[in-house]
Image (cartoon, grey):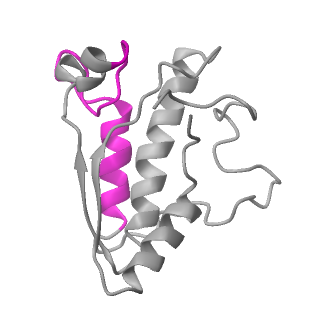
Amino acid sequence: RQKVPTPLQVKNQIRRIGNLGLKVNISEMDVRISKLHGASPEIKTLAQKQIYHDIIAAALTEPAFDGVWLWGFSDRHTWVKNFYYDDAPLIFDEKYERKPAYYALRDAIATQAIGGVVGGKVLMKEVGADGEKWGAEWMPSQGSDVHDG
């Protein structure tokens, strides 16, 4: 089982690989949420939005970051249902409608546009000024995690 990496961890890893002279792509990204045990649908949506937005916004702050590819686009045809369990990990729902995760990903990409704030004001520390860790609203306590890998 793996925990979701924080934006800072993603940023640092991309920088480390970039320092070797390599480009970094995030490939086959999806954000599985059905295994957030005990979480309401609203909390699952919040988690998915925050992960898509913050991970990509953090990645975009590094010059070595070269792109992101999703593992599909619609929950209707997600590979997760065929190999693991029922889930809704992508940015379009079963009816090909945009989910909140779509807008979160769009907003992360927009941080690079004219007038955008590089990094999208994502928490780039392990703990914010309010004392909360990134993902505290939805991250399971120690010993459990967001998805089965």
Q: Is residue 48 above or below residue 75?
A: below
In the image, residue 59 lies at what x, y percent? 41, 65
Quarter containing the N terminus: top right
Identify which residue is drawn at 49% across, 69% down: 13
Q: Left or right: where does residue 130 sit relative to residue 24?
A: right
Q: Is residue 56 above or below residue 100?
A: below
**Range of magenta residues:** 84-111
Q: Is residue 22 above or below residue 6?
A: below
Q: Quadrant of residue 32?
A: top left
| Quarter occupied by residue 55 | bottom left
**Residue 30, position as x, y percentages in the image:** 34, 38
Number of callouts in the render?
A: 0
Residue at 35% x, 28% y is 89
**104 in the magenta segment:** yes
Left/right of residue 113 with respect to residue 52 in the rendered view: left
In this image, 98 relative to 123: left or right? left
Prevalent SS, magenta region: loop
Asked whether 143 or 104 is in front, the reply is 143
